[in-house]
Image (tube, grey):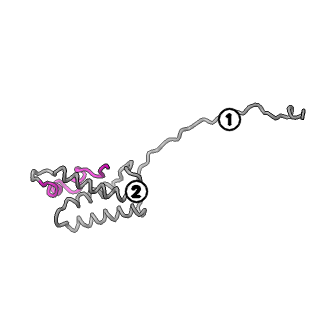
């Protein structure tokens, strides 16, 4: 299981202060790694459950839309008490998006690696004609 989002991506999306405020349980001014790891693991398992219904996991490439959904879900799980309406809306949108993927209503744009087929030279060699006019005239 690989994460669809990192701590840095959470910070980039929601801001350092917002992440520290929700993930600093020991009061040292830094997000606590176990709290972040749990939030990212939760987001990953939710995404895997939905995406795995339609696509083989792990995905070869990570679409930005899944990273965004993962960050939203992880951020949502960092709230311990009251969840702001805007965060709840973002979470609901992310879940609806994943449900659309699972139902086949939304297709992921995945970069596929191009595999060049092996090119074999085809040579046709045939033996000397077994039944020629010259051979057949004796029969």
The chief SS type of the magenta part is: helix
Q: Is residue 41 left or right of residue 118?
A: left
User: Where residue 102 appears, x then y in whole percent?
Assistant: 39, 61
Residue labelled with disc 1: 124
Return the disc, 1 or 2, that comes first in the chain's sequence: 2
State the residue at coordinates (28%, 52%): 5
Q: CA distance from mark 1 to mark 2?
A: 45 Å
In terms of secondary structure, where does tag 1 sit? Answer: loop
Q: Residue furthest bottom?
A: 85
Q: Residue furthest left?
A: 27
Image-quadrant location for residue 135: top right
Q: Nearer the viewer, residue 38 or 62?
A: 38
Mark 1 nearby-residue class (10 Å; few <14, some 14–19, many ≥20): few
Q: Is residue 124 left or right of residue 66?
A: right
For residue 2: magenta? yes
Q: Would you place residue 119 above or below residue 45 in this image?
A: above
Label ID, residue 108: 2
User: Where residue 46 appears, x then y in whole percent?
Assistant: 31, 58
Q: Quadrant of the C terminus?
A: top right
State the residue at coordinates (19%, 51%): 34
User: Where residue 78 appears, x then y in whole percent?
Assistant: 20, 59
Q: Would you place residue 43 above or below residue 119 in this image?
A: below
Q: Would you place residue 88 above or below residue 131 in this image?
A: below
Label ID, residue 136: none
State the residue at coordinates (41%, 52%): 56
Image-quadrant location for residue 131: top right
Q: Would you place residue 113 above or below residue 93 in this image?
A: above
Q: Which span is picked out in magenta?
A: 1-25
């Amino acid at each position: 299981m690989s994460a669809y989002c990192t701590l840095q991506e959470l910070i980039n999306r929601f801001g350092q202060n917002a992440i520290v405020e929700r993930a600093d349980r020991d009061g040292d001014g830094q997000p606590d790694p176990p709290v972040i790891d749990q939030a990212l693991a939760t987001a990953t398992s939710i995404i895997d459950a939905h995406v795995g219904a339609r696509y083989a996991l792990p995905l070869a490439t990570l679409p930005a839309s899944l990273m965004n959904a993962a960050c939203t879900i992880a951020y949502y799980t960092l709230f311990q008490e009251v969840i702001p309406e805007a965060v709840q809306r973002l979470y609901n949108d992310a879940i609806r998006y994943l449900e659309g993927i699972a139902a086949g209503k939304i297709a992921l744009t995945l970069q596929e690696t191009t595999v060049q087929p092996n090119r074999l030279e085809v040579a046709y060699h045939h033996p000397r004609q077994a039944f020629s006019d010259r051979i057949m005239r004796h029969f």
